[in-house]
Image (cartoon, rainbow, N blue to C red):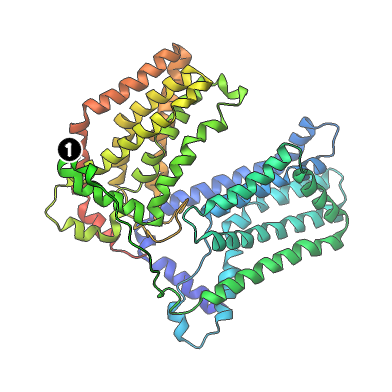
């Protein structure tokens, strides 16, 4: 039966429209996979000499284990935001004489073959080989290596449990970040030595192989709990139960002052507030607002003025980035109907442009208290806001004309990468790196004031040329209109 499932998955993948229409994206993903494999291999073979150089008086094996707490945190966060449980299309199988347990075991077994589970091995295995060649006991290192493999699989299944338990909240990532942040704070302020405890536990298991039963037991518990959750939801009518909610009507009369684009703005605002996926674009503005607190209070960053515009663009443009990168895919569910109406496409795009620049203005005003850390930060944020309005807003709209992936608005709210294509990755280069690179170069050659002036001038030029840019962008959307209709009609 498992062989039959694998055969079905293989046919589904290569016969789907995704493979036919996203060959470029698949090639890009393969390139990124190879890139990370090389990075992890380099880390695996280079970690031992690096630790010897940085900690010459300590055992590198002990030092490496003392940092495993941070690796566990990073791995769990990465999986939570990027990895999804590979649930196959099982509804057609539910009417066949196939036990649910076999289907669930296959789904969970398939998750164990995820790239996220293989990637750490490219660092763990070479590092283990280097340790054994350096004179460490083979039995100890082999036990440690097997423990790390069990730990990787445990994080894999534990991540799915966290996702399932937090899926009912709009900001499902907040409980995880709160727990991890608390553990990190306890260790950072020396209240509870979490980092030391994790390192000593791994060393104890390596020296006493019998203790490996503890992580194996935890792995089995995580697998059993995932099996239980999936087995309870695996029914034909599991998604048919309707959720009754009280309708809340918001007063959007203030949008009428924007003239003929007011109806489109009202539709966008209702779309944002009534769907979990789009609602996160608003709530994540809070995270963007406090983003600077990770850098500005630190003395080591206060002299890195070339970093200020990058932070400013992120702080003032967090909504622009999160909402703008999926234009017009937010409307993919009814895009065909929308395009059949007698509307002007430029008005449709201009309503989204107005929403983005309004968010930039609001975020800049809210970020004014950052002047506490220095007047240069406030000026950098102002320049970044002008650059966002004049340049990045148009870049976002233009990049949206290449979107070809349908978005499911009912899926998990924050950090959901369903509907993400190559466009969202490539557009980050002109969006974030270009202004930072330009400012850093001018700041190095001339000075801070000159770099700020260049960013403001670029933004002002974009504002002056707004009408011409909008006509060009609108024509690009009109040229791609029927390609988008066809792409958004695809369910896969």
x and y percent of residue 375 in the render? 47, 17
Judge from the rendering whether residue 330 lies leftward or rightward of residue 367; answer left or right. left
Task: Please identify the residue farthest to the left as the structure is shown.
Answer: 342
Q: Which residue is mark 1?
A: 471
Q: Is residue 363 visible?
A: yes
Query: For the point 51% across and 18% down, which residue is it?
Result: 374
Judge from the rendering whether residue 263 lies leftward or rightward of residue 421; answer left or right. left
Query: For the point 46% across and 54% down, which residue is it?
Result: 416
Judge from the rendering whether residue 489 lies leftward or rightward of residue 128; answer left or right. left
x and y percent of residue 109 in the render? 60, 69
Quadrant in the picture for the C terminus: bottom left
x and y percent of residue 235 in the render? 48, 79
- The correct choice, above or below, for 430 with respect to 347 in the image is above
- The correct choice, above or below, for 195 with respect to 172 in the image is above
**Is 48 in front, or is 151?**
151
**Is 221 in front, or is 484?**
221
């Amino acid at each position: 039966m498992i062989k039959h499932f694998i055969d079905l998955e293989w046919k589904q993948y290569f016969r789907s429209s995704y493979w036919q229409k996203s060959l470029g994206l698949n090639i890009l993903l393969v390139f990124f996979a190879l890139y990370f494999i090389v990075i992890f291999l380099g880390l695996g073979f280079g970690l031992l000499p690096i630790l010897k150089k940085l900690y010459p008086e300590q055992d590198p094996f002990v030092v490496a284990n003392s940092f495993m707490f941070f690796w566990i945190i990073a791995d769990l966060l990465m999986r939570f935001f990027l990895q999804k449980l590979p649930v196959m299309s099982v509804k057609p199988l539910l009417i066949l004489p196939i036990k649910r347990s076999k289907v669930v075991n296959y789904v969970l077994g398939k998750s164990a073959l995820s790239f996220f589970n293989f990637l750490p091995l490219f660092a763990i295995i070479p590092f283990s080989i280097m340790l054994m060649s350096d004179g460490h006991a083979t039995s100890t290192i082999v036990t440690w290596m097997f423990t790390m493999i069990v730990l990787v699989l445990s994080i894999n299944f534990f991540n799915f449990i966290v996702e399932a338990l937090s899926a009912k909240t709009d900001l499902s990532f907040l409980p995880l970040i709160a727990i991890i942040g608390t553990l990190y704070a306890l260790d950072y302020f020396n209240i509870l030595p979490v980092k030391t405890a994790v390192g000593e536990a791994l060393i104890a298991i390596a020296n006493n192989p019998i203790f490996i039963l503890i992580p194996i037991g935890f792995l089995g518990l995580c697998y059993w709990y995932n099996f239980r959750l999936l087995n309870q939801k695996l029914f034909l009518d599991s998604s048919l139960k309707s959720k009754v909610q009280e309708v809340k009507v918001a007063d959007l009369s203030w949008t009428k002052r924007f003239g003929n684009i007011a109806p489109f703005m009202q539709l966008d605002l209702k779309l944002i507030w009534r769907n979990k996926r789009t609602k996160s674009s608003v709530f994540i503005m809070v995270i963007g607002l406090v983003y600077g607190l990770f850098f500005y209070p630190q003395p080591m960053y206060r002299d890195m003025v070339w970093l200020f515009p990058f932070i400013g663009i992120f702080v003032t443009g967090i909504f622009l980035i999160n909402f703008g990168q999926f234009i017009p895919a937010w409307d993919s569910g009814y895009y065909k109907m929308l395009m059949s109406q007698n509307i002007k496409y430029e008005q449709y795009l201009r309503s989204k442009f107005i929403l983005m620049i309004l968010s930039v203005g609001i975020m800049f005003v809210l970020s004014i208290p950052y002047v506490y850390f220095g007047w240069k930060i406030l000026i950098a944020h102002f320049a970044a806001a002008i650059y966002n309005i004049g340049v990045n807003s148009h870049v976002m709209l233009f990049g949206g004309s290449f979107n070809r992936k349908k978005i499911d608005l009912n899926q998990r709210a924050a950090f959901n990468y369903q509907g993400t294509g190559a466009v969202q990755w490539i557009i980050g280069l002109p969006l974030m790196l270009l202004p930072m690179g330009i400012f850093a170069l001018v700041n190095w050659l001339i000075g801070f004031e000159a770099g700020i002036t260049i960013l403001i001038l670029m933004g002002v030029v974009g504002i002056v040329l707004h009408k011409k840019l909008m006509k060009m962008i609108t024509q690009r959307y009109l040229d791609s209109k029927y390609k988008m209709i066809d792409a958004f009609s695809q369910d896969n």
